[in-house]
Amino acid sequence: MKNLSKNSAKNGKKGGRPSIDNSITAITISGINTVILTENQYYTLIERFGKPLFEKALNILEEWLNTSYTGSKYKGKNNYAHFRSDGWVINEAKNSIPQI
């Protein structure tokens, strides 16, 4: 058995990842029922991508979570990681917005 760091032994996760802080609550987004983000994550993503692109990406992810068999395993979890700048959600949103 490998030696676990003090943090790993404490939270039972390999690599010493911090345990989830359950005191942080998800933000309520109008028209979005499945995507889960904290308030800080929501505003960080708007700042990073701009509101129109982020809202389009949010709707794409919402639809995928609700209709895809693969997406169903991500329901009820924080979805911040889906919004990577090189990720499929953002790329799909960029491709669907008409260029000016």
Image: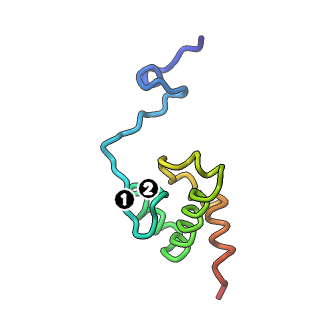
User: Quarter holding the N terminus?
Assistant: top right
Q: Secondary structure at mark 1?
A: loop
Give percent across and percent down for residue 68: 65, 55
Mark nearer the N terminus (1 vs 2): 1
As drawn, 69 above or below 92: above
Amino acid type, residue under disc 1 in the picture: Ile
Residue contact between numbered discs 1 and 2, judged by CB atoms under 8 Å: yes
Give me the residue at 51% from left, 71% from top.
55
As drawn, 15 above or below 30: above
Give percent across and percent down for residue 18: 43, 34
Q: CA distance from mark 1 to mark 2?
A: 6 Å
Residue 70 horizontal side relative to residue 25, left or right: right
User: Quarter holding the C terminus?
Assistant: bottom right
Q: Secondary structure at mark 2?
A: loop
Q: Residue furthest right?
A: 95
Given residues 43 and 73, the one toward you in this image is 73
Q: Quadrant of residue 38?
A: bottom left
Give me the residue at 62% from left, 65% from top.
90
Give me the residue at 54% from left, 28% from top.
15
As drawn, 23 above or below 99: above
Marks counted in the figure total: 2
Q: Which residue is mark 2?
A: 37
Q: Residue furthest bottom?
A: 100
Q: Which residue is mark 1?
A: 27
Amino acid type, residue under disc 2 in the picture: Leu
